Image (cartoon, helix red, strand yellow):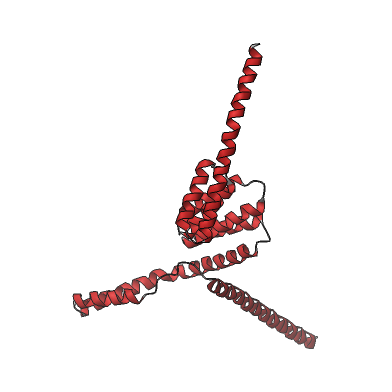
Amino acid sequence: MSRFIIRYILFLVAGVMLPIAVSAQKDVRKNIRKGNKEYRQEKFSDAVKFYENAVEENAASKEANFNLGNALYRQKEWDQAIEKYNHYTSLEQEKPEEASAAWHNIGNAMLQKKELQGSMEAYKMALRLNPQDDEARYNLAVVQKMIRDEEEQGGGEQDQQEDQQEQQQEQQQQEQQPQQNDQNQEKRAEQPDQPEQMSRDNARQLLQAIEQDERETQEKVQQIKAKEREEQAENNRRNNKNW
């Protein structure tokens, strides 16, 4: 008799909880749809609010977390966007291509933060999960080129900075201080701001520079090999004459 009562009570509890779970899931879908509508209208701040509501209702919602990351990215909240994308990758274990898209976006966000090494690793992860992602492969090549350029320029930057400091000190000795301050302000005003986002044209130029370097390197190698073959042929002719 007691077992029957316990089972009956459990059945009643399950019957009460099921409508609650269904209602919560409907709220999640409702907030996601509202967020998508605001996102399409480029009202990213409002979209963030709806996606956050969906995540509060269901922290394991893949769609809510991914879309929230996108909305935060569009607001230039790079760190928060990366956090949501990382959470999404921990949830998405069944579809490698979907997880690859999140890693691709992580690479983009890190590139915006000028974290080139982290961006490079994120693009590599995206390609491991989806080798067909040509956009990630393209961006990876661009970032690798930027890293090489920084490494090559790193040795001469310190000397250049020291020379600039010496020149500034000489100018300060020759000119009056108020006038020099005005000139410094003009110089700062003339310096262009860094672009907020690397354009596709700039990325294409960087990739073309990589390809050009590779072609020039191959041409030099071929020239060296051709010269070596000519020298070897000349040596053979001389040896034959000696015989």
Q: Position of residue 91 (x, y in %)?
A: 59, 45
In the rendered image of this protein, does residue 205 appear above or below residue 238?
A: above
In the visual, does 139 lie left or right of 159?
right
In the visual, does 151 lie left or right of 229?
left
In the rendered image of this protein, does residue 71 appear above or below residue 214?
A: above
Q: Let me know if residue 65 appears in the view.
A: no
Q: Observer-nearest residue: 209 or 52?
A: 52
User: Residue placed at 40% from the left, 71% from the top?
Assistant: 193
Q: Quadrant of residue 201?
A: bottom right
Q: Observer-nearest residue: 69 or 126?
A: 69
Q: Quadrant of residue 203?
A: bottom right
Q: Position of residue 72 (x, y in %)?
A: 48, 55
- State the count of labels: 0
Q: Quadrant of the N terminus?
A: top right
Q: Position of residue 100 (x, y in %)?
A: 62, 55
User: Residue placed at 59% from the left, 34% from the top?
Assistant: 19
